[in-house]
Image (spheres, grey):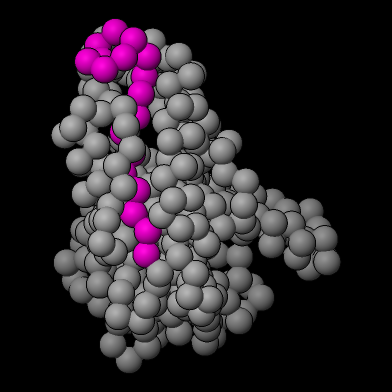
Amino acid sequence: MAILIVADSPYDRHLLKSLLGAEGYTEVLTAESSRQAFRHLGLEDPAHAVTSVDLVLMDLAMPEMDGVDACAAINTHDGLRGIPIIMLVGALETKELEAAFAAGAVDYIFKPPTRIELAARVRSCLRLKREIDRRKAVEQESFKVTRLLDAAYQKLQHVSFRDGLTEIANRRRFDEFIELEWRRGLRTSMPMSLIMIDIDFFKAHNDTYGHQGGDECLKRVASCLAGAMHRPGDLAARYGGEEFVVVLANTNRAGAAAVAEALRVRIESLEIPHSGSRVSDWVTISLGVATMVPLQDTSPAELIAAADRALYQAKREGRNQVKVANGI
């Protein structure tokens, strides 16, 4: 299956082509600009398309025409609309992602990508492309095909926001969700609370019960946290490793502290054995709570940092407890 890399940086093109080659993808095309990509795709002259492209890796920031405009141009053509586009994003370019998804991108990856993450994203999108092609062949240009394609895209975006192990929201979904709720809070002047959560002595749990036991522990803790979320403005997500995070929109400090304590009790009541813990015979969690009313000169990063400090305090003072940040 052919993959087209569109990036103005020779280093980026070489790196991506090398990583894809190491994964066995031999049919990899490169373009140094959006215009050159259009020629590869036959967008300007379909009769002169170089080859059939199954996936595009598109740099978000490029001279002349950036990745967002190029993505939009590709998706205006019926024959090209089914090609998944993964945006290549620099660390300081995340503000443009919303526009990229609106233009038709289905996923993104930070530069420089790791081989494992790039391979996973590419496999996922190529599976989607194969499914799209199969459906197109069965029901050419019909309304049903259009509905199925829309469902496929929505499914891909849904999968990209789920943690592969625990099946709850992942870090990417959390980052998007807290930004959206923060903007909502700016309009409503309602408080937002955040709970940072860490499984106590998780390394000791892995050492005692093995990685399979550790994975099962993570799944049960994640399911319990997610099951406690009942409002549209609440989200439980895996933050990374054994860390989780809970977003509570329209929730003051007292309300968030009560939710955090309820979560602590729920996790301990699961009675997941943990003989390596220094605080309990069961798996327990430490929690840090922070609350802010979003203002124009503040950001979600400040709320996250405050909750993280409170979590550190809970761990430093004995674990299996809730600590609430003050003064914000």
Q: Quadrant of residue 191?
A: bottom left
Of 163 and 191, nearer the camera is 191
**Whole-percent x and y of residue 230?**
62, 46
Q: Residue furthest bottom?
A: 64
Q: Is residue 126 visible?
A: no
In the rendered structure, the answer to whether residue 4 lies left or right of residue 83 reads left
Of 136 and 211, nearer the camera is 211
Residue at 41%, 27% (x, y): give it.
Answer: 218
Q: Is residue 169 visible?
A: yes
**Whole-percent x and y of residue 262?**
48, 34
Of 10 and 211, nearer the camera is 211
| Residue range of the region highlighted in magenta in the rendering | 275-292
Of 276 and 167, nearer the camera is 276
Q: How many marks?
A: 0
**Whole-percent x and y of residue 106?**
51, 63
Residue 207 in the magenta stretch? The answer is: no
**Whole-percent x and y of residue 128?**
58, 51
The quarter of the image holding the C terminus is: bottom left
Residue at 69%, 56% (x, y): give it.
Answer: 151
Q: Quadrant of residue 243?
A: top left
Residue 282 in the magenta stretch? The answer is: yes
Query: Is 118 above or below relative to 108?
Result: above
Residue at 49%, 27% (x, y): give it.
Answer: 266
Query: Is 252 above or below relative to 261?
Result: below
In the rendered structure, the answer to whether residue 189 lies left or right of residue 111 reads right
Residue at 31%, 60% (x, y): give it.
Answer: 303
